[in-house]
Image (spheres, rainbow, N blue to C red):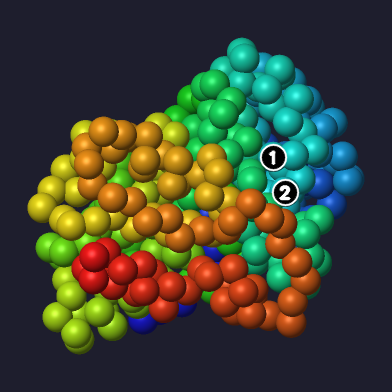
Amino acid sequence: MKLQNQRQVYGETLLELGRENKNIVVLEADLGKSTMTSLFEQEFPERFFEMGIGEANMTSFAAGLSLTGKIAFTNSFAVFAAGRAFDQIRQGISIPKLNVKIIGSSAGLSDFGDGATHQSVEDIAIMRAIPNMTVLVPADGIETRKMVRKIVEYNGPVYLRINRHDLPDLFPENQEYVIGKSYLIRDGRDIVVFANGIMVSKAVEAAEKLEEGGISVRVVNVSSLKPVNEDEIIKFTSGVKGIVTAEEHSLIGGLASVITYILRGNGIPVMPVGIEDQFGQSAHSYSELLEEYGLTADNISNSVKDFLLK
């Protein structure tokens, strides 16, 4: 299975779009070599704005650029993109529905070495709560590329969450990406796992292992957390005995909250896999943190088995 780095794909796609559309401008918070906006800067320095470590100012500046007809991309680590600039996003971008794309890079626990201050476990909850904001979490490099292209076409505020590491390709190359749509990655009959980001590949890994024991698992990629096609989500639960949600985010305000709200009152039990009400921490590796917080294929497998043993 091919691996791609979402940051690299994002940077390359942004550069391609910059060649196609002269209205695209890029703003950076002193992290261009990490977010990969440095690729855009090298070719289009006149459309690149280095704002330093000042996400609030960057966001307000982007709002102003959008009022001149520009498609403004702001870039920082997810924890700072969503947290430091919350007031400016809410007041200056979301209330007037301005055409600004907020890219939260090194999201979740993926910046494993820098600890709690740099790990975004609550960014999706923050951004989902803001009216008029679209919130997207790609599962792999293919979907990242399709999402970035799609949000340029979409007129309005968008938050896009990017992982720091290589992830296996799962999204079909020939599949059109549609904002609001969820995608069946693997069909099954016993349990459905709704996942996004890195947890989609973890869910597929779990499903493959469980199949060896005769357990059939349906895996659905819910990469659009706002908006969400609720009818689709309900259809994906047809015939299953239980539901598992899997996300690299706090269980408060993320995918688990989305799914349980949509399915309220339908009687199918839901088992959430995600980060409990706690911050991240430093570690020697990303995999070490994923293990520590239960964001693993084994934990998804155990959740599925728990349903079937009841």
- Residue drawn at x 65%, y 63% is 109
On the image, the x and y values in percent for residue 110 come to 65, 66
Q: Residue 79 has which mark?
A: 2
Seen in the image, is 243 located left or right of residue 245? left
**Contact flag, marks 1 and 2 (Cβ < 8 Å):** yes
Q: List the single residue furthest toward the top.
A: 96
Q: List the single residue furthest toward the bottom.
A: 212
- Residue drawn at x 16%, y 64% is 190
Tag 1's secondary structure? helix
Q: Residue 82 has which mark?
A: 1
On the image, the x and y values in percent for residue 161 come to 57, 50
Q: State the image quarter where residue 67 is shown.
A: top right
Q: 100 and 251: which one is in front?
A: 251
Seen in the image, is 282 located left or right of residue 299? right
Q: Is residue 287 above or below residue 277?
A: below
| Mark 1 Cα-neighbour bin, 10 Å: few <14, some 14–19, many ≥20 | many
- Residue drawn at x 37%, y 40% is 260
Q: Is residue 217 above or below residue 40?
A: below
On the image, the x and y values in percent for residue 253 come to 54, 40
